[in-house]
Image (cartoon, rainbow, N blue to C red):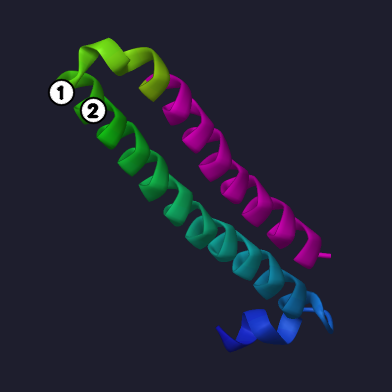
Amino acid sequence: MLNVLAETAPGEMLEGLKAIGAGLGYGLAAIGPGIGIGTVVGNAISSMARQPESAGMVRTTMFLGIAFTEALALIGFVVFILLLP
């Protein structure tokens, strides 16, 4: 392990650690929206099963919730890409 560290150029290890940190950061940022989308869809399906006559309004609201939750994942992706340089 020390041989590998001795052969790296100055600052090369820091760049690698930045890339690893950005990947881990985005992975953690994607957990929240994933759970959120699962919750939104699960509750919408339960609502449609209980009152089928309101399925159209529930479906529209579900897609809006999914879009807003997915926007959080995209913001997390952009932030960690911008922090990567």
Note whether residue 41 is visible.
yes
Instruction: Give, as a three-letter code, the residue at label 1.
Output: Arg
Quadrant including the N terminus? bottom right
Q: Quadrant of residue 80?
A: bottom right
Is residue 33 part of the magenta span, yes or no?
no
Residue 30: % across, % down: 50, 52
User: Is 78 in front, or is 51?
Assistant: 51
Task: Tell me, for residue 47, which label it has, or none.
Answer: 2
Quadrant including the C terminus? bottom right
Disc 1 designates what residue? 50
Residue at screen point 20% across, 29% down: 46
Give the main secondary structure, helix, strand or loop, of the magenta stretch. helix
- Classed neighbour count for the residue bearing mark 2: other residues with Cα under 10 Å, few (<14), some (14–19), many (≥20): some
Task: Tell me, for residue 7, which label it has, or none.
Answer: none
Q: In the visual, does 51 lie left or right of 62?
A: left
Residue 37: % across, % down: 41, 40
Q: Which residues are magenta?
A: 59-85
Note whether residue 84 is visible.
no
Give the Cα separation between the discs numbered 1 and 2: 5 Å
Q: Quadrant of residue 15?
A: bottom right
Instruction: Give, as a three-letter code, the residue at label 2.
Output: Ser
- Classed neighbour count for the residue bearing mark 1: other residues with Cα under 10 Å, few (<14), some (14–19), many (≥20): few
Q: Is residue 40 above or below residue 85?
A: above
Q: Are marks 1 and 2 in contact (CB under 8 Å)?
A: yes
